[in-house]
Amino acid sequence: MCWLTDVIIPIICALIGGGLTMLGVQKTLKAQRIESDRIRIQEAKPYLFAEHPAQTTAQDSIPQLLLKSVAGNSCAHAPRCYVKNSGNAIAIVKKVTTDNCTYIPTEGNVIDKDCVTGLNIFLVNKTETMHGWKLFVEDIYGNEYCYPMTLKGNILNIGACVEPEKLQKGKVRKSK
């Protein structure tokens, strides 16, 4: 019996083959996890649409989110924005920004699934710039989305979602 050809070489070949198989399995599992995370992020992405008060039946029953300046000062002038969330996932309002100011929610910040919500933004003063409006929301995983806004009269309308790569955290909470 030759130890080299009968024992050692088959053991070395089995170890090399097993190691290569484990690397392949690890690579496959990593690719599946990345794809699964991407799908979970898409499923949790909130889609917001402009909703005008005339299109809703009971305007008094619409939940309202109040946003005030981070500087703390505000006047009574408050443009409104009515948004409807899709049935996809909740949206967490983080802030509304203009060229000169940032506004944050004062009480509550959630837009429920398939729900119309009014955003009342109390301006710093009536002469504040009305350009560069952006609404920033997050999904349940902390990924941030930006919706440009335009002011028409006293009503703000939202545009299509802009997802700059620098805004995306790409985090998904791991389920236990």
Image (cartoon, grey):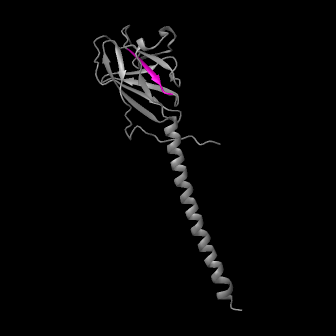
Question: Which residue is drawn at the image coordinates 49% and 44% (left, top)?
Answer: 38
Q: Which image quadrant is residue 9 in?
A: bottom right
Question: Which residue is drawn at the image coordinates 30% and 12% (left, top)?
Answer: 153
The one nearer the camera, 129 or 34, is 34
Q: Is residue 142 above or below residue 53?
A: below
Q: Residue furthest bottom?
A: 1
Q: Residue furthest right?
A: 1
Which contiguous range is marked in magenta? 80-86
Residue 72, percent across and down? 41, 15
Q: Is residue 71 above or below residue 10?
A: above
In the image: residue 126, left or right of residue 28:
left
Residue 41, percent across and down? 50, 39
In the image: residue 128, left or right of residue 84:
left
Q: Is residue 83 magenta?
A: yes
In the image: residue 106, left or right of residue 22:
left
The one nearer the camera, 44 or 133, is 44
Q: Main secondary structure of the magenta part?
A: strand
Question: Which residue is drawn at the image coordinates 60% and 72% (left, top)?
Answer: 17
Q: Is residue 23 magenta?
A: no
Residue 167, percent across and down? 40, 37
Q: Quarter of the image containing the N terminus?
A: bottom right
Q: In the rendered picture of this protein, how many numbered marks are placed on residues?
A: 0
Residue 20, percent across and down? 57, 69
The one nearer the camera, 116 or 69, is 116
Question: Which residue is drawn at the image coordinates 59% and 67% (left, top)?
Answer: 21
Q: Is residue 39 above or below residue 31?
A: above
Q: Quarter of the image containing the C terminus?
A: top right
